[in-house]
Each structure stands twice: as structure tokens, then as C-alpha cells.
Amino acid sequence: MRGHDWINTCLPDELILEILRRLDSKASHDASSLVCKRWLGLDRLSRSTLRIGASGSPDIFITFLAQRFVNVKAVYIDERLSVSLSVNSVQGKRRDRDESVLTSFKLHYTAQKRPDKEEESESLSLTDAGLTAVADGFSKLEKLSLIWCSNVTSFGIMSLGQKCTFLKSLDLQGCYVGDQGLAVVGQCCKQLEDLNLRFCESLTDVGLVELATKCGKSLKSLGVAACARITDKSLEAVGSHCKSLETLSLDSEFISNKGILAIAEGCPLLKVLKLQCINVTDRALMAVGVSCLSLEMLALHSFQQFTDEGLRSIGKGCKKLKNLILSDCNFLGDRGLEAIATGCTELTHLEVNGCHNIGTIGLESVGKSCPRLTELALYYCQRIGNFALTEVGRGCKYLQALHLVDCSSLGDEAICSIAKGCRNLKKLHIRRCYEVGSKGIIAVGENCHSLTDLSLRFCDRVRDEALIAVGQGCPLQYLNVSGCNQIGDAGIVAIARGCPQLACLDVSVLQNLGDMALAELGEGCPLLKDIVLSHCHQITDIGLSHLVKNCQMLESCHMVYCPGTTAAGVATVVSSCPNIKKVLVEKWKVSSRTKRRASSVLSYLCVDL
């Protein structure tokens, strides 16, 4: 029968609830809640995750949310995000009802907290009262993330620990939490698996030792950074009580070999180890190689005391290693990387950043011995030459992502070898590699037919013919050619005609790019969402009008320092794109009318321009 509500008539609450739980985005949840009152109530029951800001009276906002969504298991609060108490986006009677309810919450909360009207205005950051509201309102809570909520103290954490006993994941990054709060979490949250204590500056060994002692059996992941009073004593407790630990991230100048040795000997199931500890030496790394045979990911940052001996131990013992990051380790050289390559043949991800003693020979070994490599990143590696990537091209047929930054010895020969040997390449990012030119990129276009992400920032030897080859051979979705000053209309026109799936484009600082290219982009790339046109001196309002005519999905447009564009062009972009969220432009180019109509989407590089 026409107009009959078959869904609500035939389906029970349980089935509709199960359908709502399978929605994969907040937008879908929001849309479903507007269907009818029944679905609104069921949607509230189906929500398991909340992501909110910690500014704009969050304590009251959380109290409001806790009564609306009773089955929430994960709460993410980020001090860097703002939250508005008004719900102006909701229309009609429902808006009025929600606003009045929210106002009553605010008045009730304020009266309870501050009977004296002369006290200071309420805090705009999450406090212990707000955290207590989380504990009282979300009794089924399993995951809580508090990012830079600096007004939260041990008292709030104590309340949380006592009431949320099912807690499995706790992120306290940047919170001023002391030992008492952490001790209560250890005593009450026996299922805790994941704990992040980065930048918890008030913590000492007392709190972490107490937590490790009380709930160490369940702990699987621990992160500690910039905690000056966390020392080897804490790591010894972790090594003694946290036998199931799988992930450890340490960034501290107060940790030495003693602490890492305790972890290596006490946590044999360790799979992920990230270290930035300047006082740790080869001795600690050798212990990891001997004891942590399940290690799959190792990241070493800013070590001045590690040598090839440490990496040899890892290569000898950690046969399951798949991901290795070496950053600013100046005493590591080719022999250490050779040991990793020959010993850890399961390696899939390798990043070498600023390790100036690692050269061509070390990376050659990776190409010869690590056939499963899927991602390679080389940053500021001046000593790695073309022949290294030739070996990678020969041996690493499954390579999907390659990142090259400031590698002055790499040129077209290297890129040609990668293109011909790694035909599954999906992402290629090159920046300031001045020996890379059109020849290498043409080879990529002819051979890498799965490439969707290409970035060639400030590669000034790349010309239009390179992009013509890419446009003919690669289904690009992301393209960045910022600073490639020999690219003009012909290259971008080829991309527009050959890459209809293009979603993000950065053509900033292309002095030869004009309106023809923008017109072709408007015709050929209807899915374009983000475009950067800054410092393009040849484009005008005419080109902008052609661009936005068909690019109705455009969300972001950067167009500063484009002398050929005017206030009319800015107005055209703002008014023609229904999904626009950000337009970056000089303030003086925005008319008063455009400011009134679209102030929320306008951003200014400098208010004085």
C-alpha cells in the first residue's frame, strides 16, 4: 500500500538496532536519527563511540551526552577541538527542545558547583567534575582518550578508575595526572591493556610501579614520553609484572640500558619497540636481539650511541622483523643495514632518515635479500646512489610506496629501475631530488599502471611530457607538483583528461599554469575535492569560474598570491561549490558581501595582506 510504513510495522527494535550498529559513519547515524522518533531512540542506543572537544563548557556537555547515549563504550576527548553548546544545525521544535534541555543542565550544574555567583566563570576545559560525569554516565566504558586535558588531575582519574572497571584502553597524553590516580587505575581496572602516558609530567616511578604491580598481567601496550621522573625503576617493574606486553614506546633521557634490559628479559612477547633514549647503547639493543624473538617493529630515533653492532644483534635474533625505522642515528652504517637485510628477510617497511653513514651498499643488500618489501622511505640520504634503487627494483617486486626526500645522488636511472621492476607501485613521493627529471617519471607512467598517488615537489627538471605519460598510464587520485616550475598547461591538461578520479591536486608555484588547465580540470575531474593554486600568477577569475562549474564536490581551495584573481573570483568559488569548507585567500580580496555569506569557510594567510 502506498505510503505505508512497512519497516516500522514489520521490524522489531532488535533488528533495527542491529542495522543501525552497522552504519559506518557519524553522518549516517545522524541521518538515521532524523527518520522518526522511534529511530531517534534506537539510534541513541546504538551509539558506542563519542568524539567531542574539551572546550566550551565540556563538563556540562558530557553530562548531557551521558543521559542521551547509555551504551557508549569509547569516549575520545581532545582539548584541541572546540565544542559548541548550541545545536543550531537542528531545525524546528526539536532544536528548541534540545536547547532548553541543555540550558537546564547548565543551570543545574552551575548551581551545584558554584552557589556563590561571584566566583569565576566556569572553566572552558574539561575538569575533574567532567571526568566524574564520564565515569558516572558511561559505566560500560572500555576506551577513554584525554588529549591535552590539562585541568584533569588525579582526583578525576581516581573516580574514573573506581567506576569504570571494564576499562581496557586509557590515553592520558598531556594530562596533569599524579601517582595517586594511576595507582587507583591499577587497583580497579584489571582488564587494562593499553596505556599512554606521553607528556604526563607530574608522574613518578611510584605511580607506574604501582600500576604495573596491580594490573600488569593484562597490560599489552605502554607509551611513556617526556616524563622526567619516570626512570629505570619503572621499567624494571614493567619487566617483572607485564609479561604480556607487546608494544612499548619510550622517549626519555632518563632511561638507560638497565631499564631496556629489564624489558627485554621480562617481556618476551614484545612485538613493537619504539625508542628515543639518548643514554641507551648497543648493550640494550643486543639484549633485545637475544630475548625479543617476536619483535616485528623497531623504531630508533636520535641515537648517538648505537652502532652497527646493535643492528647485527637484531638481524641475528629478530627474524620476524617487518618494520624498521632508523632516524638520525649517525653511527649506523652499511654493515648494520646489511645485517638487517640478510637476517630479517620478512622486512616489509623500511625508513632511513638522516642516517648519513648509510649508503648505497646497505640499501643494495635490502634489494637483494628482502623480496617482500612494500614500502621504502629515504630522507636526507645523500650517500645512497642510483645502483641501490636498481637493486630494489630488481628484487622488491611487491613495492607499493616509495618516498624520497633530499636524496641528491638519486636520479632518473634510479626511478626508471623502480618503474620497470616495481609495477605494483601505488604511491610515489619525491621532494627536492634535483637529479630526477622527465625521463624517470615517463617510465613511471609507462609501467606503473596502479599508481594513484604521485608527489613531485620542487623537482624542477620534470616537464610537461612527464605528466602526459602519467595521465595516459596512471589512474591518479592525488597529485602534487608544487614548485615544478617547468610544468605548464599541457601537463595538467593531460592529467585532467586521463585521470577522472583525481580528488586532490597541488599545483602551487607553477608560474606557467593558466586558465586553460583549470578549464580542463573542471571538465575532466568532477570528483576534485582539494586544490592548491597559490603562487600561480597566470590564472584569473575566468579559469576559476570554469573550474568550479563542474567540480561540485570541491571542499578546499588555496589561492593566495594569485595576482590575476580578484574578489569576484573568490565569490565565484564560494557561491558555486555547495560543499566548500575552506578557502584560503588574501583578506583584501574578499568583498563584504562574501564575508557575510561565507565567513565560516574563509581563511586568511595574513590579516594585513
Image: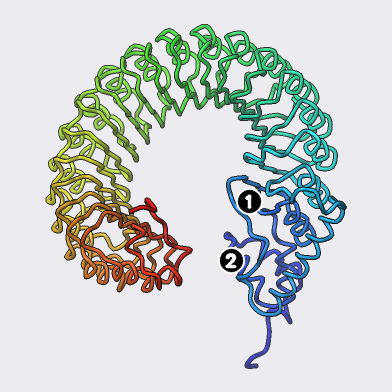
Q: Is residue 150 above or below residue 34?
A: above
Check disc 2 and give the amino acid type. Answer: Ser
Instruction: Report helix, strand or loop for mark 1.
Output: strand
Q: Position of residue 542 (x, y in %)?
A: 21, 70
Q: What residue is rendered at 45% in x and 72% in y?
A: 597
Tell me which corner region of the image, top left, top right, bottom left or bottom right, holds residue 168: top right
Badge 1 local density, few (<14 within 10 Å), some, or many (20+)?
Answer: many
Distance (Cα) linking label 1 and label 2: 21 Å
Residue at the image point whose x is 20% and y is 48% from the top: 445
- Which three-letter amino acid code belongs to the residue tagged 1? Gly
Q: Please, which residue is most extreme toward the front here?
A: 118
User: Closer to the camera, 21 or 182?
Assistant: 182
Q: Is residue 575 left or right of residue 282?
A: left
Image spot of residue 363 (x, y percent): 30, 22
Asked if 233 appears above or below 483 in the picture, the reply is above
Q: Residue 128's spot in the image, x, y percent?
A: 78, 42
- Residue 178 in which image quadrant: top right
Question: To which residue does mark 1 refer?
Answer: 53
Image coords of residue 354 (percent x, y): 35, 22
Instruction: Locate residue 563: give its quadrant.
Output: bottom left
**Is label 1 or label 2 in front?**
1
In front: 411, or 560? 560
Q: Quadrant of the N terminus?
A: bottom right
> As displayed, is residue 363 above or below residue 261?
below
Report the side of 392 relative to 438 (left or right): right
Of the numbered discs 1 and 2, the one sitting upstream in the chain is 2
Q: Is residue 319 shown left or right of residue 440?
A: right
Mark 2 — residue? 28
Q: Secondary structure at mark 2?
A: helix
